Every structure is written in structure tokens, then in C-alpha cells.
Image (cartoon, coloured by chain):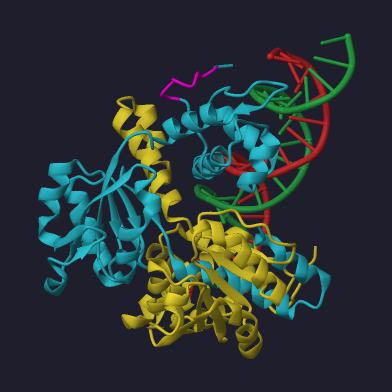
Chain colours: A yellow, B cyan, C red, D green
Amino acid sequence: MTTRSSTDPTRVIPEATVARLPVYLRALTALADSGIRTCSSEDLATAAGVNSAKLRKDLSYLGSYGTRGVGYDVDYLRYQIAREIGVTQDWPVVIVGIGNLGHALANYSGFRSRGFRVVALLDADPGLIGQTVAGVAVRPFDELEAIVQEHDVAIGVIATPALAAQGVADRMVAIGITSILNFAPAVLAVPEGVDVRKVDLSIELQILAYHEQRKANGAGAAAAAAADGGAA
Amino acid sequence: MTTRSSTDPTRVIPEATVARLPVYLRALTALADSGIRTCSSEDLATAAGVNSAKLRKDLSYLGSYGTRGVGYDVDYLRYQIAREIGVTQDWPVVIVGIGNLGHALANYSGFRSRGFRVVALLDADPGLIGQTVAGVAVRPFDELEAIVQEHDVAIGVIATPALAAQGVADRMVAIGITSILNFAPAVLAVPEGVDVRKVDLSIELQILAYHEQRKANGAGAAAAAAADGGAA
DNA sequence: TAGATTGTTAATCGATTAACAATC
DNA sequence: TAGATTGTTAATCGATTAACAATC
């Protein structure tokens, strides 16, 4: 059997685990803020909304940061997870599309506090250029390349209408951006090596509607149980 | 073996499939808008960004709506999926917390076009009361109960700061709301039978940062391959 | 030492995928 | 009939979970 240490760059962390690490990070920050120095896997699992076996399994992919019989040091584990995710460093990001959602994203304090720095807001609409949102000036979309090169931007956020999204993504990829967070309700085609994650507000509501409909219809126990599948 | 017809309320659709149905619906709408009447599973899969085997497997849970050798009638399949999700009916929703994000959500056209009707905007801040956002007046949070009962609201959206979220959720649950879409960066505790889905903007960025970090570090082929795990 | 709690194992469960028989 | 494409099967893969040996 091959053992992989926490510094081995070839060890692989399952995607499902990666997606939960930020949740653990947030829970640890909340614990630290309330003055808690040490916690068990059970405590942290409760704070993060998962079961403790899953939490311990997830943490085991990172390394061995707890003490048997004692638990985890909150600050130490928090730092290790932050380092693993990469949020101990600064990540410059650009936001393209400064409509209502772009506005909200530019103002979102949760980005800055986790190491994401909005270095530019871009829009194709001349009417918006020069406006200041959250202390950052809105600039023409054409300036994307210069901005990305100046600030070494690796992550782009798309908050344009659906029809504009693919064009923006193509331009981002051409300029060297390799990670895209897409809020436009469109499927983006990108070359291999570029990561895209999407957030679709209406899809989440539709998933709720599906279960809600089943609750309403489901007089039967089977239907009620099924409807509960997505509960927290 | 037991066969379950598409009208059998006890048949269960896997969660992973339910989460993709809205994506198929959106892709079918795009195809219909561009004048396409019929499509193969391959066509639709491409438009939705999944592989065709998965698409056919997903559709098979709903029923048998295609024609072998021919494909799917776009309008017919679209209607069947919409009915399955429940978006052929009207869903009144309330939004609590009218900050930047609440503003953006109130203005989001993708809700209305999919059968979600924002019947009220609520906020605890007296300074916001009476303002109109997207044609809807902001009302005091205290009026939640009256509004939910008047409009028979089943779905609530939380866009408050993290600290206020649990209190809002408790109130919603007490009043009879059974589905919650949570944008606050907090884990909500709710009783069984209440569905919660969460959208966390900064978590998505952190997942991208994790992979981005590995791309930057990973001179080795193994690390590069791992970093590509979340690509579209 | 006795009690507590981690890190790991192994079983189970659910999701994905390729392949192909059914059938238009 | 021949070609095309669905719906289903079965194999594979990855994620979850309970249980417990290791160990503080």
C-alpha cells in the first residue's frame, strides 16, 4: 500500500470532500469566534451540519491533525484547512456584468474576508462605466486583458445575461483565466484544464418545488419519505 | 420485479436526477426558442452539458417520452419535465432580508419565468420599510405570518446576515413554510419534513481556489489531472 | 489505568457509464 | 428492410456510514 503524506502533491482529495472543506472552515471560524479552543469531531460535525464519521473521514485525507482522546485544536485545524483550500493566500478576481447580481457580488463581504480581492468590475454597457460600486470603478469590458495581466488574475466571475456568458468565458479563457464562477443561466463550453462552477438561483428553487409538490400530493408515507430526501 | 408508471406517486427519482431536471428544462427551452422541434438524446445532452447515457437514464425515471430511431419532441418533453418538477403551477415565495443580495433576488427575472412569484419582501430594518423593489413594497418582518397565510406561501428565501438566519428560519417553520432557500452563510437547524437548500457564494469560489492552487503547484502530471476534476 | 476520541477499515449505498437489445 | 436512436442492463466507480482498533 502507498501512503501519501499531507505534503505529497500527488495525493488526491475526493471532490465531495473538497466541497465540504469550506463548510468546515466556516464552522471552525464560528467556534473560534465564540471562544472555543478545542472541539471533538462530534462538535465540529454538528456545527457544520454533517455526521461525525464523514467529518473524520474527510479530515483524514488532509492528514492527522487531531489528538485521540482529546479532539482538535480549533485554530490549528482551521489553519490547516485554510492552507489546504488555498485561502491563506490572496486571490485577485474580476467580476464581469454589473447588473443587480454583479452589484450584490461586488458588495459581498464574504469574498474579501476569505482572501478574494475584487480587483475590477467590468461591463459592456457604456452607461455603467465610471460608476463606483463597493469602492471599485466599473470599467469597459475591453480592459479585461490589461487588468488580468496587471493583477495576475486567475479567477473570473460571470454575472452577465445568459446570452453574453459564452462570449465572456471565451475571452477570459483566451486571456489566461483558468477558473470561472458562472452565475449566468447558461452552459459554458471551455477547454480542458479550465474549471467552471455554476450557481443557478432558479435551479435551486426548482429543486425545492419538486419536493414541495411531492409533500403536497403525497398523502402516502412513501411519497412523504421521498420528499424529505433533500432535507438539511 | 415491480414496474412503476409515471403516475405512480411512490416511484422515487434519485436526488442527483432531480437536481439535473431543471438543467434539462432550461436546455429544452433554449432549443425550442431557436426553432428546434425534435432532438436526440445526444443533442439535448450537449445542450445541457452532460453525457447522453446519463440523460437517457435520468429521463427513464420519468417515463418513456421519446421515440426510438427518432428522438424527443422538444415541446412535449419540456412539458413533461416541467410537470414533474412542479413548475407548471404557480409558487408564491417570500424573500426575507432586502440587502444587496435580496435586491438582486427580487429583481431576478429567472424566478418569475419559471412560475415563482415574489409575493412579499420583508426586512427587520425600519429604514427599508416602504421602499419598493422590483415593484414590490418592503414590509416589516412581523407581517410574515399574515402574508404566508394570505398567499399560501410554501417556499421562503433567506438573504439576511448569517446571525439572523436561524431566527428567520425558526419563524418560517413555525408559520408553516416547509421549503427554505438559504443564502446566508450559516447552517440552519430545521425539523424533519422541512427542506433546506443553501447557496453559498464564497464556498463556490473556495472550491475553485483549491483547484487553482493545485494547477499552479502541480508541475507533475498527477496533480494537474487531479486539479481538473471539477471541470465542466 | 480508565475514559474519551481519533483515524481507518470494510460494508453498504447511490451515481455514472458503456454497451446493446428493443423498436421506431 | 436498413439505419437511427431510445430505454435498460450490468459493470464500475465514488461516497457514505457504522464499527472499532489505536492511542492520547
| Of residues B51 and A87, the one drawn nearer to the viewer in this rendering | B51
Residue B9 belongs to the span the image colors magenta: yes
* Image side of residue B212 versus residue A224, left or right: right
**In this rendering, does residue B111 appear at all?**
yes
Residue B96 percent coordinates (x, y)? 24, 61
Residue B38 occupies quadrant: top right
Q: Residue at x 35, y 42 (%)?
A: B115
Give the farthest residue toward the front: A126
Residue B91 found in image quarter: top left
Residue B12 seen in render: no
In depth, the one of A214 and A12 nearer the eye is A214
Q: Main secondary structure of the magenta part?
A: loop
- Percent x, y for residue D4? 78, 27
Left or right: residue B43 compared with residue A79: right
Q: Is residue B81 magenta?
A: no
Dividing the picture into quadrants, the one containing residue D1 is top right
- In the foreground, B205 or B165: B205
